[in-house]
Image (cartoon, rainbow, N blue to C red):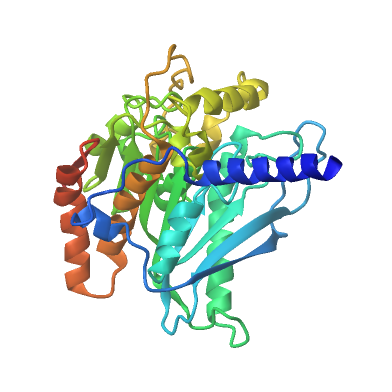
Amino acid sequence: MFKKIVLSLVLLLVVAAVYLQFGHLPEPLPADSQSSYWLEKGIYDVSYFDVELVDDTRPTQKNGDYAGSNERRLQTRIWYPQDLVASAPLLIYSHGFMSSRSGGSYLAEHFASHGYIVAAMDYPLTNMRAPGGALVKDVVNQPADISFLIDQFVSWDADAGHQFYERVDEKHIGVMGLSLGGMTSTLAAFHPRSADLRISAAVSIAGPVFVFGPAFYESRNIPFMMIASPIDAMIDYSTNAATILPNVKGAVLVTMNNASHTGFAAPSRYLRWLDNADLLGCSMVTRGLEKTTDELWASELGGPEEGVLAVPQTALCTTDPLPPAMSPIRQQWLTTLAVFPFFESQFALSELRRKEASEYLLNTYASEIAEVSVVRAAK
Protein backbone atom coordinates (compact mmCIF):
# COMPACT_ATOMS: atom_id res chain seq x y z
CA MET A 1 0.00 0.00 0.00
CA PHE A 2 2.80 2.39 0.94
CA LYS A 3 4.60 1.68 -2.37
CA LYS A 4 1.42 2.46 -4.30
CA ILE A 5 1.05 5.79 -2.49
CA VAL A 6 4.68 6.69 -3.20
CA LEU A 7 4.30 5.66 -6.84
CA SER A 8 1.16 7.75 -7.17
CA LEU A 9 2.88 10.78 -5.65
CA VAL A 10 5.87 10.38 -7.96
CA LEU A 11 3.54 10.09 -10.96
CA LEU A 12 1.64 13.16 -9.84
CA LEU A 13 4.89 15.13 -9.51
CA VAL A 14 6.00 14.03 -12.98
CA VAL A 15 2.67 15.08 -14.50
CA ALA A 16 2.85 18.43 -12.69
CA ALA A 17 6.42 19.00 -13.89
CA VAL A 18 5.47 18.21 -17.48
CA TYR A 19 2.47 20.52 -17.27
CA LEU A 20 4.59 23.33 -15.82
CA GLN A 21 7.07 22.91 -18.65
CA PHE A 22 4.71 22.42 -21.58
CA GLY A 23 1.23 23.51 -20.49
CA HIS A 24 -0.50 26.78 -21.36
CA LEU A 25 2.00 27.71 -24.06
CA PRO A 26 1.33 30.57 -26.50
CA GLU A 27 0.82 30.00 -30.20
CA PRO A 28 4.18 29.74 -32.01
CA LEU A 29 5.21 32.45 -34.41
CA PRO A 30 4.35 31.80 -38.08
CA ALA A 31 7.03 29.51 -39.48
CA ASP A 32 7.48 31.58 -42.64
CA SER A 33 7.92 34.91 -40.81
CA GLN A 34 11.12 36.87 -40.36
CA SER A 35 10.38 36.88 -36.64
CA SER A 36 10.48 33.10 -36.54
CA TYR A 37 13.87 33.22 -38.28
CA TRP A 38 15.37 35.69 -35.79
CA LEU A 39 14.09 33.60 -32.88
CA GLU A 40 15.81 30.43 -34.09
CA LYS A 41 18.65 28.98 -32.00
CA GLY A 42 22.09 29.59 -33.48
CA ILE A 43 24.62 27.06 -34.72
CA TYR A 44 26.54 26.73 -31.44
CA ASP A 45 25.81 24.44 -28.53
CA VAL A 46 25.83 26.47 -25.33
CA SER A 47 27.65 25.83 -22.07
CA TYR A 48 27.84 27.84 -18.88
CA PHE A 49 29.69 27.87 -15.60
CA ASP A 50 29.49 29.75 -12.32
CA VAL A 51 32.43 31.48 -10.74
CA GLU A 52 32.86 33.75 -7.72
CA LEU A 53 34.79 36.90 -8.56
CA VAL A 54 36.08 39.15 -5.78
CA ASP A 55 36.80 42.85 -6.14
CA ASP A 56 38.99 43.62 -3.14
CA THR A 57 39.38 47.30 -4.07
CA ARG A 58 35.82 48.33 -3.16
CA PRO A 59 33.70 47.65 -0.05
CA THR A 60 30.15 46.38 0.38
CA GLN A 61 28.19 48.69 2.64
CA LYS A 62 26.53 47.73 5.91
CA ASN A 63 22.95 46.56 5.42
CA GLY A 64 20.59 45.79 8.29
CA ASP A 65 22.09 42.99 10.34
CA TYR A 66 24.84 42.53 7.76
CA ALA A 67 28.05 44.20 8.97
CA GLY A 68 29.36 44.93 5.50
CA SER A 69 32.65 43.89 3.94
CA ASN A 70 35.87 45.42 2.66
CA GLU A 71 35.32 43.69 -0.71
CA ARG A 72 32.55 42.96 -3.20
CA ARG A 73 31.85 39.30 -3.93
CA LEU A 74 30.18 38.69 -7.26
CA GLN A 75 28.63 35.30 -7.96
CA THR A 76 28.86 35.22 -11.74
CA ARG A 77 27.41 33.01 -14.47
CA ILE A 78 29.01 32.91 -17.89
CA TRP A 79 27.33 31.45 -20.97
CA TYR A 80 29.50 30.78 -24.00
CA PRO A 81 29.36 29.00 -27.38
CA GLN A 82 31.11 25.65 -27.52
CA ASP A 83 33.83 25.13 -30.13
CA LEU A 84 34.23 28.85 -30.72
CA VAL A 85 37.37 29.49 -32.77
CA ALA A 86 37.20 33.29 -33.13
CA SER A 87 36.84 36.21 -30.74
CA ALA A 88 33.25 36.82 -29.62
CA PRO A 89 31.29 39.94 -28.64
CA LEU A 90 30.79 40.25 -24.89
CA LEU A 91 27.46 41.14 -23.29
CA ILE A 92 26.92 41.88 -19.61
CA TYR A 93 23.37 41.28 -18.30
CA SER A 94 22.23 43.05 -15.10
CA HIS A 95 19.38 41.63 -13.04
CA GLY A 96 16.58 43.63 -11.45
CA PHE A 97 15.85 44.34 -7.80
CA MET A 98 15.37 41.12 -5.80
CA SER A 99 16.29 38.99 -8.81
CA SER A 100 19.40 37.01 -9.71
CA ARG A 101 21.99 36.36 -12.40
CA SER A 102 19.70 33.81 -14.08
CA GLY A 103 16.94 36.38 -14.69
CA GLY A 104 18.06 36.92 -18.28
CA SER A 105 18.95 33.31 -19.04
CA TYR A 106 16.66 33.12 -22.08
CA LEU A 107 18.56 36.02 -23.64
CA ALA A 108 21.95 34.66 -22.62
CA GLU A 109 21.28 31.24 -24.12
CA HIS A 110 20.02 32.72 -27.38
CA PHE A 111 23.01 35.02 -27.77
CA ALA A 112 25.54 32.32 -26.86
CA SER A 113 24.05 30.00 -29.48
CA HIS A 114 24.82 32.73 -32.01
CA GLY A 115 28.45 33.17 -30.98
CA TYR A 116 28.34 35.68 -28.10
CA ILE A 117 29.80 35.41 -24.62
CA VAL A 118 27.27 36.56 -21.99
CA ALA A 119 27.92 37.14 -18.30
CA ALA A 120 25.64 38.07 -15.40
CA MET A 121 26.38 38.70 -11.71
CA ASP A 122 24.41 38.49 -8.52
CA TYR A 123 24.96 42.05 -7.34
CA PRO A 124 25.99 41.95 -3.67
CA LEU A 125 23.07 43.86 -2.14
CA THR A 126 20.26 43.96 -4.72
CA ASN A 127 19.93 40.24 -5.45
CA MET A 128 17.10 38.18 -3.98
CA ARG A 129 19.33 36.60 -1.30
CA ALA A 130 21.28 39.73 -0.34
CA PRO A 131 22.57 39.70 3.26
CA GLY A 132 20.40 42.00 5.35
CA GLY A 133 17.73 42.01 2.64
CA ALA A 134 17.84 43.53 -0.84
CA LEU A 135 18.91 47.20 -0.75
CA VAL A 136 17.90 49.23 -3.81
CA LYS A 137 20.29 52.14 -3.24
CA ASP A 138 23.33 49.89 -3.81
CA VAL A 139 22.60 50.37 -7.52
CA VAL A 140 24.99 53.32 -7.34
CA ASN A 141 27.85 50.81 -6.93
CA GLN A 142 26.78 48.39 -9.64
CA PRO A 143 28.19 50.14 -12.74
CA ALA A 144 31.66 49.72 -11.22
CA ASP A 145 30.86 46.00 -10.79
CA ILE A 146 30.29 45.88 -14.57
CA SER A 147 33.67 47.55 -15.17
CA PHE A 148 35.31 45.05 -12.83
CA LEU A 149 33.75 42.16 -14.76
CA ILE A 150 34.89 43.61 -18.09
CA ASP A 151 38.39 43.86 -16.59
CA GLN A 152 38.26 40.13 -15.83
CA PHE A 153 37.38 39.27 -19.42
CA VAL A 154 40.10 41.53 -20.78
CA SER A 155 42.65 39.81 -18.54
CA TRP A 156 41.38 36.35 -19.53
CA ASP A 157 41.63 37.29 -23.20
CA ALA A 158 45.35 37.98 -22.66
CA ASP A 159 45.99 34.85 -20.54
CA ALA A 160 47.29 31.99 -22.69
CA GLY A 161 46.18 29.49 -20.05
CA HIS A 162 42.55 30.62 -19.89
CA GLN A 163 39.67 29.19 -21.93
CA PHE A 164 38.81 32.71 -23.15
CA TYR A 165 42.34 33.39 -24.41
CA GLU A 166 41.98 35.46 -27.59
CA ARG A 167 38.24 34.77 -27.56
CA VAL A 168 36.91 38.15 -26.32
CA ASP A 169 36.24 40.89 -28.87
CA GLU A 170 37.13 43.94 -26.79
CA LYS A 171 35.82 46.30 -29.49
CA HIS A 172 32.31 44.87 -29.20
CA ILE A 173 31.16 45.00 -25.59
CA GLY A 174 27.50 45.63 -24.77
CA VAL A 175 25.36 45.88 -21.66
CA MET A 176 21.72 45.01 -21.10
CA GLY A 177 19.55 44.77 -18.03
CA LEU A 178 16.05 44.59 -16.62
CA SER A 179 14.48 47.16 -14.29
CA LEU A 180 17.14 48.22 -11.76
CA GLY A 181 19.55 46.33 -13.99
CA GLY A 182 18.39 48.52 -16.87
CA MET A 183 19.33 51.57 -14.80
CA THR A 184 22.67 49.94 -14.00
CA SER A 185 23.33 49.37 -17.70
CA THR A 186 22.36 52.95 -18.56
CA LEU A 187 24.68 54.32 -15.87
CA ALA A 188 27.58 52.14 -17.03
CA ALA A 189 27.08 53.20 -20.64
CA PHE A 190 26.36 56.93 -20.31
CA HIS A 191 27.28 58.47 -16.96
CA PRO A 192 29.21 61.67 -17.79
CA ARG A 193 31.81 61.01 -15.11
CA SER A 194 32.04 57.26 -14.66
CA ALA A 195 30.77 55.53 -17.82
CA ASP A 196 32.91 52.63 -19.00
CA LEU A 197 34.15 53.75 -22.40
CA ARG A 198 34.67 50.15 -23.51
CA ILE A 199 30.89 49.73 -23.69
CA SER A 200 29.74 50.43 -27.24
CA ALA A 201 25.99 49.61 -27.12
CA ALA A 202 23.35 49.36 -24.39
CA VAL A 203 19.80 48.09 -23.81
CA SER A 204 17.49 48.92 -20.92
CA ILE A 205 14.49 46.64 -20.47
CA ALA A 206 11.88 48.51 -18.43
CA GLY A 207 14.60 50.37 -16.61
CA PRO A 208 13.99 53.57 -14.61
CA VAL A 209 15.48 56.68 -16.25
CA PHE A 210 13.29 59.38 -14.67
CA VAL A 211 16.31 60.96 -12.95
CA PHE A 212 18.30 61.32 -16.19
CA GLY A 213 17.89 64.55 -18.13
CA PRO A 214 19.22 65.29 -21.65
CA ALA A 215 22.65 66.34 -20.33
CA PHE A 216 23.17 62.89 -18.82
CA TYR A 217 23.42 61.30 -22.29
CA GLU A 218 25.37 64.02 -24.08
CA SER A 219 28.91 62.91 -23.29
CA ARG A 220 28.55 59.66 -25.26
CA ASN A 221 27.06 58.82 -28.63
CA ILE A 222 26.48 55.07 -28.66
CA PRO A 223 23.51 52.94 -29.79
CA PHE A 224 20.85 52.66 -27.09
CA MET A 225 17.51 50.88 -26.95
CA MET A 226 14.72 50.98 -24.39
CA ILE A 227 12.03 48.29 -24.23
CA ALA A 228 8.98 49.19 -22.14
CA SER A 229 5.25 48.63 -21.67
CA PRO A 230 2.48 51.17 -21.00
CA ILE A 231 0.85 48.73 -18.55
CA ASP A 232 4.04 48.08 -16.55
CA ALA A 233 2.87 48.19 -12.91
CA MET A 234 6.31 49.01 -11.49
CA ILE A 235 8.09 51.41 -13.86
CA ASP A 236 5.82 54.18 -15.11
CA TYR A 237 6.01 54.46 -18.90
CA SER A 238 5.29 58.18 -19.21
CA THR A 239 8.05 59.36 -16.85
CA ASN A 240 10.65 56.80 -17.93
CA ALA A 241 10.50 55.21 -21.38
CA ALA A 242 8.71 58.18 -22.93
CA THR A 243 11.70 60.42 -22.13
CA ILE A 244 14.12 58.39 -24.25
CA LEU A 245 13.28 59.69 -27.73
CA PRO A 246 13.57 63.39 -26.85
CA ASN A 247 16.64 62.88 -24.64
CA VAL A 248 18.86 60.34 -26.44
CA LYS A 249 19.99 60.96 -30.01
CA GLY A 250 19.43 57.99 -32.30
CA ALA A 251 17.88 55.88 -29.52
CA VAL A 252 15.37 53.14 -30.32
CA LEU A 253 12.19 52.84 -28.26
CA VAL A 254 10.34 49.52 -28.44
CA THR A 255 6.89 49.83 -26.90
CA MET A 256 5.44 46.43 -26.03
CA ASN A 257 1.74 46.71 -25.35
CA ASN A 258 0.17 44.34 -22.80
CA ALA A 259 3.54 43.34 -21.34
CA SER A 260 3.98 43.04 -17.59
CA HIS A 261 7.15 44.15 -15.82
CA THR A 262 7.65 40.74 -14.22
CA GLY A 263 7.16 38.99 -17.58
CA PHE A 264 10.57 40.19 -18.80
CA ALA A 265 12.35 37.97 -16.22
CA ALA A 266 13.04 34.33 -17.06
CA PRO A 267 11.33 32.75 -13.99
CA SER A 268 8.00 34.37 -14.91
CA ARG A 269 7.42 31.64 -17.49
CA TYR A 270 6.04 29.67 -14.54
CA LEU A 271 3.54 32.44 -13.81
CA ARG A 272 1.85 32.20 -17.20
CA TRP A 273 -1.41 31.03 -15.64
CA LEU A 274 -1.83 34.43 -14.00
CA ASP A 275 -3.69 37.14 -15.90
CA ASN A 276 -0.79 39.46 -15.11
CA ALA A 277 2.55 38.32 -13.65
CA ASP A 278 2.94 41.69 -11.88
CA LEU A 279 0.41 40.41 -9.35
CA LEU A 280 3.22 38.41 -7.76
CA GLY A 281 6.06 40.71 -8.83
CA CYS A 282 4.52 43.75 -7.15
CA SER A 283 3.94 41.84 -3.95
CA MET A 284 7.60 40.86 -3.73
CA VAL A 285 9.13 44.19 -4.76
CA THR A 286 6.95 46.44 -2.58
CA ARG A 287 7.88 44.36 0.47
CA GLY A 288 11.54 44.58 -0.48
CA LEU A 289 11.40 48.35 -0.85
CA GLU A 290 9.77 49.01 2.53
CA LYS A 291 13.04 49.63 4.38
CA THR A 292 14.28 52.22 1.85
CA THR A 293 11.03 54.07 1.17
CA ASP A 294 12.13 57.20 3.02
CA GLU A 295 15.82 57.12 2.06
CA LEU A 296 17.06 59.65 -0.50
CA TRP A 297 19.95 58.23 -2.50
CA ALA A 298 19.52 59.48 -6.09
CA SER A 299 21.95 62.34 -5.38
CA GLU A 300 24.68 59.71 -5.02
CA LEU A 301 24.40 59.17 -8.78
CA GLY A 302 25.44 62.77 -9.46
CA GLY A 303 24.05 66.28 -9.65
CA PRO A 304 22.33 68.57 -12.17
CA GLU A 305 25.64 69.36 -13.86
CA GLU A 306 25.81 65.69 -14.84
CA GLY A 307 22.19 65.54 -15.96
CA VAL A 308 20.96 63.79 -12.80
CA LEU A 309 17.65 65.34 -11.79
CA ALA A 310 16.18 65.71 -8.30
CA VAL A 311 12.70 64.45 -9.16
CA PRO A 312 10.45 62.07 -7.22
CA GLN A 313 9.76 58.60 -8.55
CA THR A 314 6.19 57.74 -9.50
CA ALA A 315 4.67 55.35 -6.97
CA LEU A 316 5.04 51.67 -7.82
CA CYS A 317 2.25 49.14 -8.12
CA THR A 318 -0.74 51.45 -7.65
CA THR A 319 -2.82 50.07 -10.55
CA ASP A 320 -5.83 48.19 -9.24
CA PRO A 321 -7.01 46.01 -10.77
CA LEU A 322 -4.11 45.06 -12.99
CA PRO A 323 -5.05 44.79 -16.67
CA PRO A 324 -4.61 41.45 -18.46
CA ALA A 325 -1.08 40.92 -19.79
CA MET A 326 0.36 38.68 -22.49
CA SER A 327 1.92 35.32 -21.71
CA PRO A 328 5.39 35.80 -20.19
CA ILE A 329 6.71 33.20 -22.63
CA ARG A 330 5.50 35.21 -25.62
CA GLN A 331 6.79 38.36 -23.94
CA GLN A 332 10.24 36.83 -23.69
CA TRP A 333 10.10 35.80 -27.35
CA LEU A 334 9.28 39.37 -28.30
CA THR A 335 12.03 40.71 -26.05
CA THR A 336 14.56 38.43 -27.71
CA LEU A 337 13.30 39.63 -31.09
CA ALA A 338 14.21 43.19 -30.13
CA VAL A 339 17.44 42.71 -28.20
CA PHE A 340 19.11 40.17 -30.51
CA PRO A 341 18.72 42.15 -33.76
CA PHE A 342 19.71 45.34 -31.93
CA PHE A 343 23.11 43.96 -30.96
CA GLU A 344 23.51 42.14 -34.27
CA SER A 345 22.97 45.45 -36.07
CA GLN A 346 26.01 46.76 -34.19
CA PHE A 347 28.26 43.76 -33.58
CA ALA A 348 27.76 41.31 -36.50
CA LEU A 349 30.90 40.76 -38.54
CA SER A 350 29.40 41.30 -41.97
CA GLU A 351 27.88 44.56 -43.17
CA LEU A 352 25.07 42.61 -44.81
CA ARG A 353 24.12 40.94 -41.51
CA ARG A 354 24.18 44.28 -39.71
CA LYS A 355 21.87 45.80 -42.33
CA GLU A 356 19.49 42.82 -42.18
CA ALA A 357 19.29 43.08 -38.40
CA SER A 358 18.62 46.82 -38.51
CA GLU A 359 15.95 46.40 -41.19
CA TYR A 360 14.19 43.73 -39.18
CA LEU A 361 14.28 45.68 -35.91
CA LEU A 362 13.21 49.06 -37.32
CA ASN A 363 10.66 47.89 -39.87
CA THR A 364 9.74 44.20 -40.08
CA TYR A 365 9.45 43.49 -36.35
CA ALA A 366 6.50 45.79 -35.72
CA SER A 367 4.82 44.84 -38.98
CA GLU A 368 4.79 41.16 -37.97
CA ILE A 369 4.13 41.52 -34.23
CA ALA A 370 0.86 43.27 -33.40
CA GLU A 371 1.82 44.05 -29.79
CA VAL A 372 4.87 46.19 -30.57
CA SER A 373 5.78 49.54 -32.06
CA VAL A 374 9.30 50.73 -32.82
CA VAL A 375 10.40 54.35 -33.08
CA ARG A 376 13.90 55.71 -33.59
CA ALA A 377 14.93 59.16 -32.39
CA ALA A 378 16.60 61.65 -34.69
CA LYS A 379 20.39 61.49 -34.63
Q: Quadrant of residue 210?
A: top left
Q: Quadrant of residue 113?
A: bottom left
The location of residue 255, given as percent across then percent down, is 27, 36
The location of residue 82, given as percent across then percent down, is 50, 77
The location of residue 368, given as percent across then percent down, is 17, 45
Q: Residue furthest right?
A: 2
Q: Nearer the viewer, residue 161 or 60?
A: 161
Q: Quadrant of residue 375?
A: top left
The location of residue 71, given as percent across then percent down, is 74, 54
Q: Nearer the viewer, residue 366 or 300?
A: 366
Q: Is residue 295 visible?
A: no
Query: Is residue 302 toward the left or the right of residue 12 in the image?
Result: left
Q: Residue furthest front?
A: 1
Instruction: Quarter of the image for the N terminus: give it.
Output: top right
From what the image shows, is residue 313 above or below residue 53? above
Q: Is residue 315 visible?
A: yes
From what the image shows, is residue 260 above or below residue 312? below
Name which residue lies at 28% across and 75% down: 349
Name which residue lies at 65% across and 34% down: 135
Name which residue lies at 43% across and 51% down: 176
From what the image shows, is residue 299 above or below residue 336? above
Q: Residue furthest bottom?
A: 160
Query: Is residue 156 toward the left or the right of residue 182 in the image?
Result: right
